[in-house]
Image: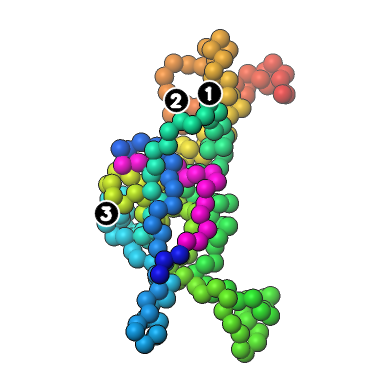
Amino acid sequence: MEKRSYLRWEDPVLGISGEGRVTPLMPGCQVVYTVVDDTGKVIVNNEIADAPDEAKYVGQEHVPLAIDMAPVQPHTAQRKARTCESCHGNSKVAGLGIGDGTFGLGQNKPVVEDLIDAKTGKVIPAKYTVQIPAIPKLDFDWSQIVTRDGVQLATVGSHWPLSRAFNKKEIDTFMRTGTCMGCHQNMSQEDLWKKVSEDGKLDFKQHNELMNKMLHNMAKNGKKK
């Protein structure tokens, strides 16, 4: 018997598609299974399969869980697009999970709503009922697919070898961009941008040097804001 649980449509996660392009991801087959034998005995409860092939594809030792986030190819349905900061200022979009992955932590432990010792976290009554059984392997939030260090936690588009979560370098670039909106929001104003920009692409060190130069120039001219 298969059931659906909470589907997360808001703030779609971004990742790499089977063509090696940045694309939105959506929940695919995210199976948590329980096996019951013909006598009614539970053989396996709340289990998630491992995906060793995924670890091989992305070149890491950690084996992701087989709870897939599938790349999609959305088409333009309206003129208004997402703002830059709606992606670059949002850790969930980078694949790090809601609230940097803190929202749904603790699902690898059973949920008990009863009298609990506030210091130890232990249930006080000798007899109690588990309201939500643990999913032992799920030690991260459902909305998270990668760590801040670029370790992929779940499968991404398991049918295509090129599809994956962002790696560390991409995450660092992605999240750093959110702090740059103050300047880069003016890139569409060609006359203004030509006066302050340089041709080509700056690396992290060059960008910092340029920002430092701007700060000292503002200080020299007595500019506080």
Q: Is 62 in the magenta?
A: no
How far is disc 2 from disc 1 in space, using C-alphas? Answer: 9 Å
Q: Disc 1 residue type? A: Leu
The residue under label 1 is 210
- From the image, state whether disc 1 or disc 3 is nearer to you: 3
**Range shown magenta:** 4-18
Magenta highlight on residue 12: yes
* Quadrant of the snapshot with the N terminus: bottom left
Question: Would you place residue 3 above or below residue 79 in this image?
Answer: below
Q: Which mark is residue 56?
A: 3
Display colour scheme: rainbow
Give residue 206's position: percent from left, percent from top: 47, 26
Ranked by sequence position, the earlier of labels 2 and 1 is: 2
The amino acid on which the numbered mark 3 sits, given as a three-letter code, is Lys
Quarter occupied by the C terminus? top right
Mark 1 neighbour density, 10 Å: few (under 14) some (14–19) many (20 or more) = few
Vertical relation: 68 (above or below) 194: below
| Residue of label 2 | 202
